[in-house]
């Protein structure tokens, strides 16, 4: 009976998404509708779509468990950083200007933004290829998080479960793209907020934690608030910075700004997205930070990717509530999969095929091709997920390479008029090759290389991601100083001329 209640809850969730897809998908008539929703998204729709793309099973299962295991209650700093830097500051700095630029220039993808800003077709092609290839590990990390849920909470074969999720993500995308995804994300965002609130209450009141008194006692122990050494602080801060500022250069996050309706909605979105991040990210990392109340290192502590699911299982949650929590994790993951898939596939179809291979491709065929690439991307992600790479590693490779390459030329394009094509290329390549180091070491390890240096470097994805982002910014500035005469003033003037207005 308990399992039946869980499955009924999951079935209701899936049915709701299908209904949203059928009803909303009929309104998607063009490629712009499919990729940016016709730029008609209000504050709640945009902010919750941003938040659900941000937080998935990767955060709840992978990062929360790993940071809790390594840093105890200090791990909550990651959730706070995500809310302050990854949501509040990101929306203040990026949302309104990005929406303004994308609306005036009819930009639908991040690579298209680069061509419009720097006048470089090669940059557009390179960025599209990097986005498609290196978003696959991130998508795969979401699948890995779901595999842990299937194994530990549902007790079913993870391969079967992941196929179901892959098909669900395909349906949401194929029904109508951005608009369907955004409205599904709105529902999923509400589920996530309710689910996290219930989850926090239930875990805190569990026998293992012992309520607020138990948390206070936990904070006085070495496991609860450990004394971190220098390298541990570096590791923690690298995680905080990568998971916070890393979103500033990710196409699936930036595309949320493209679809905002007007300036008023952009301003409201700042508040909503920040509240959502504080609740969901703060709550997720808080739950993970309590893992030492449930298990003992060296005795019964599970592997990092299994910690949070097993904590939920051992908390003796009522069946209905467990179903809601599973739906919370599914909601977070499916929405992220859809956002990542749409960003990667539209980059390939619009920016490479439509821009370089077949420029006269009709809009309708371009939309069909995007959907084909969506299916291909989901299949490739499923295959990579089966390499059994830790969730934290896969995500850090993806975010590190993409944000390390593109954060600087994207951010500076909005504010720094002296940045030109040469400076942007220098920053992109610097960040790309620095962030590529851990991923390359992982590939070498998969090929059988057990060298000590290789093993060490492949686990330092967050650190290299931070180094890549900072180095890319510095290189962009330095090169711009020595190449100011090459700045295209017409392009710069075109980009900085007003506020966001509704179309």
Image: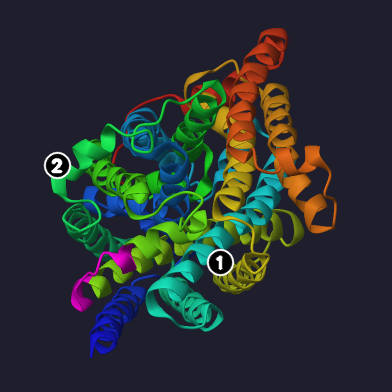
Task: Confirm whether the magenta stretch covers residue 88.
Answer: no
Q: Position of residue 179 (x, y in %)?
A: 36, 64
Residue 178 visible in the picture: no
Q: Residues within 10 Å of mark 2 (few under 14, many from 20)?
A: few
Quadrant showing the N terminus: bottom left
Q: Position of residue 135 (x, y in %)?
A: 60, 54
Dot 2 lies on which element? Answer: helix
Q: Which mark is residue 363?
A: 1
Count of numbered circles on the image: 2
Give the magenta-colored segment's residue range: 312-321
Q: Residue at x 22, y 78 (%)?
A: 319
Q: Toward the viewer: 360 or 470?
A: 470
Q: What colouring style does the render use?
A: rainbow
Give the CA distance from mark 1 to mark 2: 61 Å
Q: Position of residue 46 (x, y in %)?
A: 30, 50
Q: Toward the viewer: 213 or 440?
A: 213
Q: Toward the viewer: 188 or 488?
A: 188
Dot 1 lies on which element? Answer: helix
Q: Residue at x 65, y 52 (%)?
A: 134
Mark 2 lies on residue: 213
Residue 97 visible in the picture: yes
Q: Residue at x 70, y 43 (%)?
A: 458
If you read the primary sequence from the N terminus, does the residue marked by circle 1 or circle 2 appear first?
Answer: 2
């Amino acid at each position: 009976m308990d399992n039946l209640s869980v499955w009924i809850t999951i079935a209701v969730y899936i049915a709701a998404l299908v209904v949203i897809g059928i009803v909303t998908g009929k309104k998607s008539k063009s490629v712009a509708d499919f990729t940016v929703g016709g730029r008609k998204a209000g504050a709640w729709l945009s902010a919750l779509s941003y938040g659900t793309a941000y937080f998935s099973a990767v955060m709840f299962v992978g990062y929360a468990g790993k940071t809790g295991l390594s840093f105890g209650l200090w791990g909550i700093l990651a959730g706070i950083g995500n809310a302050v830097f990854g949501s509040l500051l990101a929306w203040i700095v990026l949302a309104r200007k990005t929406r303004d630029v994308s609306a005036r220039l009819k930009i639908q993808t991040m690579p298209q933004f680069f061509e419009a800003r720097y006048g470089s077709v090669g940059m557009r092609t390179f960025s599209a290829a990097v986005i498609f290839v290196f978003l696959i590990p991130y998508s795969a990390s979401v699948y890995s998080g779901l595999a842990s849920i299937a194994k530990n909470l549902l007790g079913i074969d993870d391969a079967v479960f992941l196929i179901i999720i892959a098909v669900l993500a395909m349906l949401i995308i194929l029904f109508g793209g951005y608009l369907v995804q955004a409205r599904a994300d709105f529902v999923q965002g509400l589920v996530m907020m309710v689910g996290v609130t219930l989850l926090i209450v239930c875990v805190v009141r569990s026998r293992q934690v012992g309520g607020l008194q138990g948390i206070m006692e936990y904070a006085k122990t070495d496991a609860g608030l450990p004394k971190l050494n220098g390298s541990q602080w570096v590791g923690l801060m690298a995680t905080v910075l990568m998971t916070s500022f890393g979103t500033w250069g990710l196409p699936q996050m930036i595309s949320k700004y493209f679809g905002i309706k007007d300036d008023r909605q952009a301003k409201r979105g700042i508040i909503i997205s920040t509240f959502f991040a504080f609740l969901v990210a703060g709550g997720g990392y808080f739950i993970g930070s309590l893992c030492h109340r449930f298990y003992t290192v060296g005795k019964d502590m599970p592997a990092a990717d299994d910690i949070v699911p097993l904590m939920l299982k051992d908390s003796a949650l009522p069946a209905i509530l467990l179903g809601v929590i599973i739906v919370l994790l599914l909601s977070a993951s499916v929405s992220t999969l859809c956002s990542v898939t749409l960003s990667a596939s539209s980059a390939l179809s619009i920016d490479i095929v439509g821009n370089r291979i077949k420029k006269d491709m009709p809009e309708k065929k371009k939309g069909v091709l995007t959907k084909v690439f969506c299916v291909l991307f989901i299949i490739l992600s499923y295959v990579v997920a089966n390499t059994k790479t830790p969730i934290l590693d896969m995500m850090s490779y993806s975010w590190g390479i993409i944000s390390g390459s593109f954060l600087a030329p994207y951010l500076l394009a909005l504010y720094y008029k002296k940045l030109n094509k040469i400076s942007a290329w220098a920053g992109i390549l610097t960040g790309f090759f620095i962030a590529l180091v851990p991923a390359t070491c992982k590939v070498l390890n998969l090929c059988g290389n057990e060298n000590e240096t290789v093993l060490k470097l492949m686990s330092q994805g967050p650190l290299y991601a931070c180094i890549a982002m900072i180095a890319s910014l510095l290189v962009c500035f330095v090169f711009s100083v020595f190449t100011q005469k090459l700045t295209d003033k017409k392009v710069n003037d075109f980009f900085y001329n007003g506020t966001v207005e509704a179309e």
